[in-house]
Amino acid sequence: MCRQRIAFLDYARVLACFMVIIVHSCEFFYIGDSGLEIKNRDDGLWVSVIDSAFRCAVPLFVMISAYLLVPVKESAGLFFRKRLVRVVVPFLIWSVLYATLPYLWGAMSAEDVGRSVLTLTYNFNNASGHLWFIYMLLGVYLIMPVISPWLEKVSKRDEQIFIAIWFLSTFLPYLREITGPVYGECDWNEFSLLWYYSGYIGYVVLAHYVRTYLSLSRTTEFATGTVMFAIGYFITAAVFYSRIDTAVTLTEIEVSWRFCTPNVVFESLGAFLVMKSLFGSVRKESRLVVSVSDMSYGMYLMHIFILGFVFNLVNGQFTTPVTIVLVGVSTFVICYMLTRLISLLPGSKYLVG
């Protein structure tokens, strides 16, 4: 049985896809060949302002999937078979393309190709760093049928307790900055006290809670979401910017950008509620929005190929913020057009989902 289309999730998916591409457009201005490389404070400011606003993109994707799929109603076997065709096969094909195609335009040597292909047996490689997200998403899919029976039976209060403990776990990245390993973490045990309540599973439960229990008027929902997003955004941007002069590594400067931090949780839930309040009552969606939503997975898979090409065309011709936006918007449009064309081919689901 087909699930009913939920309009605001299409808008949220389109927005999240656009956010991801803008985030990666920012990378040209703070990541160099050797890691962290911010050329001037102006670049640092604009990266802080723009990128920090869009850190909720990945959690939004997780919440969208959870809002649609959890609790899982079908058998685990059927659930996984659907994800196999829709997610896994395109992911594997694009992983191979990222590991081999750069050789054609001289970005990889034959030795690099060999190492990249070998790496694919256990992880993504340097050319396809954005595909870390698919590994995480597949892990979320694996746990969905496991937690679904619990979500069907658990009380509202118990679900609130789970979310509260999970939210506590999102402070761990900051706590580790101060103390180092915490709550039982050590060289021989990375599974700390809050391990089983941490990570992206929290966003899955949070989305279920919003759908099942959170009943607000559109005005209250919009106001609440806006305030939450603003608080999360301010903290995210302020912490990143404050570290520009002192951070030596990407890990140090990106601590407030980690997707399972309290500030990004605020951003993500805030953005989700705002989208729900704005588009929750839409009955007839824009055909373009539905089309972009349907193409978003293919767009995500291919966009790194397009991003670098577009950046090389416009680099040095505009100011930093204009370049970031221009590269992001152009890449978004090109990826949509290419994915749409591919979707017209027989068997396209194996390539773009």
Image: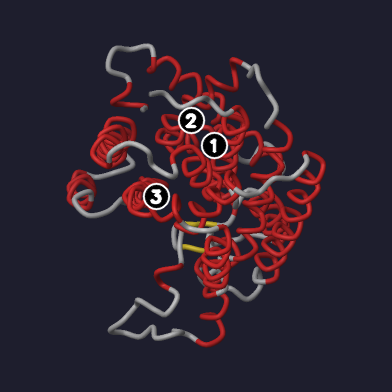
Instruction: Give the residue drawn at x 63%, y 32%.
Output: 8
Q: Residues within 10 Å of mark 1 (few under 14, many from 20)?
A: many
Image coordinates of residue 160 in percent, x first then y, are 58, 63
Q: Is residue 18 left or right of residue 231?
A: left
Q: Residue under circle 2?
A: 296
Q: Is residue 199 left or right of residue 9?
A: left
Q: Are marks 2 and 1 in contact (CB under 8 Å)?
A: yes
Q: Amino acid at mark 2?
A: Ser
Instruction: Give the residue drawn at x 47%, y 62%.
Output: 35
- Residue in front for this viewpoint, 314 or 139: 139
Q: Quadrant of residue 95?
A: top left
Task: Say if 158 sits above or below 128 in the image.
Answer: below
Q: Is residue 58 left or right of residue 47?
A: left
- Residue in front for this viewpoint, 233 or 262: 262
Q: Amino acid at mark 3?
A: Ser
Q: Residues within 10 Å of mark 2 (few under 14, many from 20)?
A: many
Image coordinates of residue 34 in percent, x first then y, are 44, 62
Which image quarter holds the N terminus?
A: top left
Q: Residue under circle 3?
A: 148
Label 1 – label 3 distance at C-alpha: 27 Å
Label 3 – label 2 distance at C-alpha: 26 Å
Q: Residue under circle 1?
A: 17
- In this view, the mark in front (3 or 2): 3
Q: Earlier in the sequence, mark 2 or mark 1?
A: 1
Task: Say if 181 sits above or below 55 in the image.
Answer: below
Q: Quadrant of residue 156?
A: bottom right
Label 2 – label 1 distance at C-alpha: 6 Å
Number of the label disc, if any, that sits on residue 31 = none
Q: Quadrant of residue 245?
A: bottom right
Give the structural element (helix, strand or loop) at label 3.
Answer: helix
Image coordinates of residue 142 in percent, x first then y, are 31, 50
